[in-house]
Image (tube, helix red, strand yellow):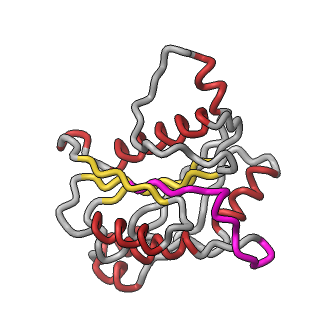
Amino acid sequence: MLQITLLNRPALKIGRINNSIRLQSLVAQLPLISCKVCVIIPVRNEAENIKATLLALTNQVDLTGKPLNKNCYEIIVLANNCSHNSVAIVRHFARNHPDLMLHLVEKTIHSDRAHGGWVRKLLMDEACRRFQLIERDLGVIASTDGDTRVASNWIAATLAEIEAGADAVGGRIITNNRERNKLDKTTRLFMML
């Protein structure tokens, strides 16, 4: 399933509101000054799907169908308490795609906070911190999941909407037949599948 949360909050204003706020760094490498979008992906045991998720983000195009400049976005994957080989797959993918700004964070999070909401919050905080580092006032945080394949123009379309004045952008969810068939009948009826 696809979940998208985009924030168009001036990163510097966040820092100016309370200069004593210091966000803990998850990624040591500095972001590129040209980075406009930080794609965040919380992952827990997504070995079956994460490669397709990353491949969809690697092959992004602009609104005319030309390859999107990979220097305008970065991807942060936070592997939360993974017991499958999701981490190894992300590492291997990063090695095979050195032109992609892909950062992997491995964390063991206490069970009371080891859920998607908390992990997404950690990633959003990190994205804000990174935009502050490069003094990007209008950085876009785009969130998806480790079992999702975004559209080939997802980043470009999102940027176009934000640049046109939108404060937030959401996306359409198209479920996978295999996943949909795993749902019980009541859930399928509720979701009108």
From the viewer's perspective, is 60 left or right of 86?
Answer: right
Residue 79 spot, x, y in % from top left: 31, 56
> Relative to residue 92, is residue 108 drawn left or right?
left
The residue under the point 75% across, 77% down is 66
Residues 93 and 51: in front is 93
Q: Nearer the viewer, residue 88 or 176?
A: 88
Residue 61 in which image quadrant: bottom right
In reply to whether residue 183 is colored magenta, the answer given is no
* Residue at the image point whose x is 17% and y is 62% from the top: 83
| Quarter where residue 172 is shown | bottom right
Q: Nearer the viewer, residue 111 or 92?
A: 92
Q: Which residues are magenta?
A: 63-77
Reply above or below: 133 against 104.
Answer: above
Q: Quadrant of the C terminus?
A: bottom left
> How many badges with numbers are in the image?
0
Residue 171 is situated, as x and y percent measured from the top left of the image, at: 60, 63
Where 173 sits versus 44, above or below? below
Which image quadrant: the N terminus? bottom left
Position of residue 27 relative to residue 86, above or below, is above
Give the percent coordinates (x, y) of residue 38.
Answer: 57, 51
Q: Residue at x 82, y 51 (%)?
A: 164
